[in-house]
Image (spheres, helix red, strand yellow):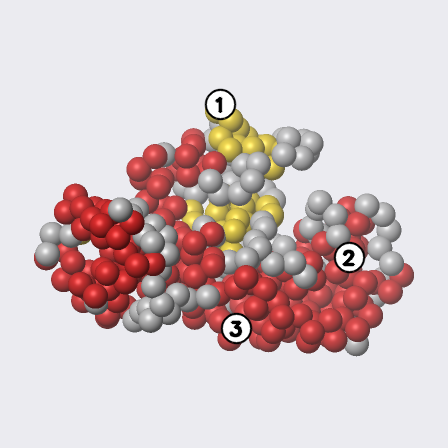
Amino acid sequence: MGWWQVSADTLAGSRFVISPLSEAIASLMTLDRGTASHPGERVWLDAHQPAYRERLAGDPVAGALMPAAFGGHWIADFLAPAPAGEGEPAFGEELVSIRETTLDAALADLTVSSGGPPPAVLHRSDLPERAADLLEWVWAETVLPYWARRSRILEADIVARTAQLSRDGWAAALAGLRPGMRWLGEGRLQINAYDYPPREISGAQLLFVPVTMHGGWVSWDMPRRYAVIYPCSGALAEAGRRPPPLTQPLTPPLTQPATQALAALLGPGRAALLVLLDTPKSTTQLVALTGLRLGSVGRHLKVLFEAGLLRRRRAGRSVLYYRSAAGEVVVSAASTDLTA
C-alpha cells in the first residue's frame, strides 16, 4: 500500500482548498473514461462527450496523450500539479505550471504513467503547450458553464469535512475522503491500496482538494507541497448535476406522501430543508442541495429555528443547522402517520 509519513506540524497546517484546474482534470478523465457514477453525470457526459471525441479526432497529439497520461494506475505528474494552496487561484494561473514544463520532464512523466516510451507523435517541443490547450478547452467548454454551481458544491463539501474534523478528529475525516485512504497511526497516512514506496512529507504543505467528478489522485510539488484530490460527498455531487426541484417531493428520509404532508404544513421550501437537516449542514450546503437562493434559505431557516424545529452551532466560520428534538418529532410523525 502507498503511505506518507506525516508529522504533527504538517497535519496541523493542512488545509482544504478549491482548485479549478483539478476540477478540469477530473472532468477530462471522466470525458475520456466515458462512464458516469450517477444519472446526473451521465446527462453531463451525453452533452459534452461527442464534442470531446471530435476534439481528439482532430488532434492526433491529444489523442495519443490521453492513454499515455491517464491510461494506467499513475497519472503523468506534469498534467496534475499540486494546487498552490493560497485562496482560489484563477484557472489560467494554475495552467502556467503545465505550459512551462520542459519536454524532457513531460516525456519522463509519460514514460512512468504509460509504463514505457511515449509514442513518437508526442516527441515534440510544444507537447506541454498542447496538453495545456486540451485542458483549457475542457475548462471553457465543459466546466466553466457550470462553475458557479460547482464551486458552491465544493465549498459545501469543505464545510462538511471541517465540521466532521472538529467533531470526530483527523482519523475519521481522512477515512472518508477516498477509497483506500485511512490513518494508520504513528504519523502514517495511507493514501491508496497500491504497493508504492512510502514518502516522507513532514515539513511540507498538505492540501485536500475536492472535485465534483468521481475519482481522485495525489499530486505534489516536491518537497514543498503535497495534495490529495478526492471526490466530494455523493449527495452534494449529485445535487450539482440534478438540483432537486421543490415542486417534486423529496423521497429520503421520508416517503413521498409524508414529504407532501410536510410541504402542505410548512411550505415546500421549509419542508425540504427540514428533511435535509437530519445531519448538520450549512446554508451553503443547503443552497447547493436545494437550488434555492441564499436569501430564501436564510429566511426559511430563521422561521424553522424560531419555531423550535432547528438548532444551530458554529463550526469554524460556518453555522451548521440541524433538527431539534421537536423537529425530529414533526418529521417522524409525518412519516409514521402516513405509513401506519
Q: Bin the neighbour count of mark 1 within 10 Å (Cα to Cα): few under 14, some 14-19, many 20 and up.
A: few
Among the 4 quarters of the image, the one containing residue 137: bottom right
Question: Which residue is outermost to the top?
Answer: 186
Q: Position of residue 10 (x, y in %)?
A: 45, 37
Residue 296: image tag: none
Nearest the camera: 28 or 322? 322
Position of residue 275 in the picture relative to residue 209 (left or right):
left
Q: Which residue is under mark 2?
A: 67
Circle 1/circle 3 CB separation < 8 Å: no
* Mark toward the start of the polypeptide (1 vs 2): 2
Mark 3–mark 2 Cα distance, whole angstroms, equals: 25 Å
Q: Earlier in the sequence, mark 3 or mark 2?
A: 2
Q: Would residue 299 be found to the left or right of residue 217 on screen?
A: left
The amino acid type, in three-letter code, at marker 2 is Pro
Answer yes or no: is residue 179 visible.
yes
Residue shown at the point (39%, 65%) measured from the top left: 244
Residue occupying the far front of the picture: 340
Instruction: Say which residue label 3 marks.
Output: 144
| Spatial CA span between label 1 and label 3 | 42 Å
Residue 340: image location, x then y, percent: 26, 46
> At x 60% / y 48%, what residue is drawn?
217
Number of the front mark, 1 or 2? 2
Disc tally is 3
Q: Nearer the viewer, mark 1 or mark 3?
A: 3
The answer to the question of whether label 1 and label 2 lie on touching residues, with beta carbons closer than 8 A, is: no
Left or right for 124, reference 183: right
The reply to whether residue 283 is visible in this rendering is no
Which is more toward the observer, 336 or 17?
336
Residue type pointed to by label 3: Leu
Label drawn at residue 186: 1
